[in-house]
C-alpha cells in the first residue's frame, strides 16, 4: 500500500478523545470504534479497507484513540 503509485494522500487520520472525567471502559471504547468503522466504511466489506487504532491513556485520566486509515479501496485500488 505504501508504494501505490498515483496517490498524493495514501492515508488519513483522526483522533477520538474523551474528557478525563468520562473514564470510558474498554468495552465502551470498543463500541465507539465499532460504530466508527460502520460509519466510515458504510456499504463496504472489511476486505476492501484497511485501518488501525492506537489507544493512549493519559496520566490525568484522559483517553484518546488515534486512527490511521488507507485512502484506497483495497479491492479496486482506487482512491
Image: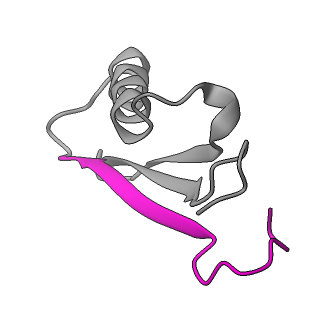
Q: Quadrant of the C terminus?
A: bottom right
x, y (%) of residue 6?
71, 81
Q: Does 18 appear in magenta? A: yes
Q: Is residue 18 left or right of residue 39?
A: left
Residue 5, placed above or below residue 15:
below
| Residue positioned most to the top | 27
Q: Quadrant of residue 47?
A: top right
Which residue is at 49% across, 52% downward?
Answer: 67
The answer to whether 40 is drawn above or below residue 12 in the figure is: above
- Vertical order, 33 against 40 (above or below): above
Among the 4 quarters of the image, the one containing residue 71: bottom right
Which residue is rendered at x = 28% and y = 50% of the image? 17
- Which colouring convention does the figure follow? one colour
Residue nearest the viewer, comparing 17 with 7:
7
Name the residue at 63% across, 49% down: 73
In this picture, residue 19 sits left or right of residue 51: left
Q: Which one is in front, 18 or 53?
A: 53
Residue at the spot 36% in from the left edge and 35% down from the top edge:
36
Q: Quadrant of residue 3?
A: bottom right
Q: In the image, which residues are magenta?
A: 1-19
**Residue 39 in the image: x percent, y percent?**
33, 34
Please state the total of marks drawn on the protein image: 0
Front in this rendered view, residue 65 or 50: 50
Q: Is residue 30 left or right of residue 61?
A: right
Q: Is residue 16 magenta?
A: yes
Please state, as top left, top right, bottom left or bottom right, where the N terminus lies in the image.
Answer: bottom right
Q: In front here: 27 or 34?
A: 34
Q: Position of residue 45 (x, y in %)?
A: 59, 25
Amino acid at each position: 500500500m505504501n508504494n501505490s503509485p498515483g496517490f498524493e494522500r495514501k492515508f488519513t487520520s483522526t483522533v477520538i478523545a474523551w474528557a478525563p472525567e468520562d473514564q470510558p471502559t474498554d468495552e465502551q471504547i470498543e463500541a465507539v470504534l465499532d460504530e466508527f468503522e460502520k460509519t466510515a466504511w458504510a456499504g463496504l466489506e472489511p476486505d476492501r479497507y484497511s485501518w488501525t487504532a492506537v489507544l493512549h491513556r493519559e496520566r490525568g485520566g484522559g483517553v484518546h484513540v488515534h486512527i490511521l486509515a488507507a485512502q484506497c479501496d483495497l479491492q479496486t485500488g482506487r482512491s
